[in-house]
Image (cartoon, helix red, strand yellow):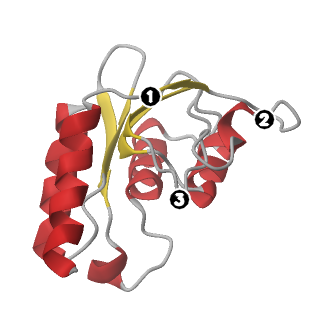
Amino acid sequence: MRLALAEARAALATGDVPIGAIVVGADGTVLGRGRNEREAHRDPTAHAEIVALREAAASVGDWRLTDATLVVTLEPCVMCAGAIVNARVPRVVLGAWDPKAGGAGGVYDVLRDGRLNHTAEVVGGVLEAECAAVLREFFGERR
């Protein structure tokens, strides 16, 4: 989670919402890193999770990330949760919960919906206070 937090803080340089993600392989190797890049690239899909998933898929040479864990500072939105399901990621570790847009139990539970072709284990609240503080500070400065 500390690596994901470092990515989140790096997003601040481009004015992006400070959310960071990493994809870790079964052996602990970091396969992909991502931070929000929507402002940096003017791309509505450039969420931290999507960026990290793309890098991890390129790293392993396969879109299926069946032995990976995605670690993210904020609960994935529905779009990102859908990408996680499609990438077959079996485990998601998240920092802060998102009661407004969460797709892993906060509002929707895409990752654990048994009607889909894949589900993921969700571990929440890891370094939650620190992950939430980065976001609170960011939005506090803008409001």
Question: What is the three-letter code of the residue carrying label 2?
Answer: Asp
Helix, strand or loop for disc 1: loop
Question: In the visual, does 23 lie left or right of 123?
Answer: left
130 vs 58: above or below: above
Percent x, y for residue 56?
A: 42, 42
Dots 2, 3 in contact, CB < 8 A: no
Distance from label 1 to label 3 (Cα)? Answer: 16 Å
**Residue marked by disc 2:** 113
The tag earlier along the polypeptide, 2 or 3, is 3
Percent x, y for residue 81?
A: 60, 48
Dot 3 alpha-carbon crowd within 10 angstroms: few under 14, some 14 to 19, many 20 or more? few
Kindly identify the residue that appears in the image at 15 percent across and 61 percent down.
137
Question: In the visual, does 103 lie left or right of 1?
Answer: right
**Residue marked by disc 3:** 100
The tag earlier along the polypeptide, 1 or 2, is 2
- The residue nearer to you, when weighing 47 against 30, is 47
User: Residue 62 appears in which quarter of the rendering?
Assistant: top right
Question: What is the three-letter code of the residue carrying label 1?
Answer: Gly
20 vs 94: above or below: below
Percent x, y for residue 89?
A: 58, 32
Distance from label 2 to label 3 (Cα)? Answer: 19 Å
Quarter of the figure with the N terminus: top left
Q: How many marks?
A: 3
Percent x, y for residue 26?
A: 42, 16
Kindly identify the residue that appears in the image at 76 percent across and 32 percent down.
118
Quarter of the figure with the C terminus: bottom left
User: Residue 39 appears in which quarter of the rendering?
Assistant: bottom left
**Residue marked by disc 1:** 124
Residue farthest to the top, as pictured: 27
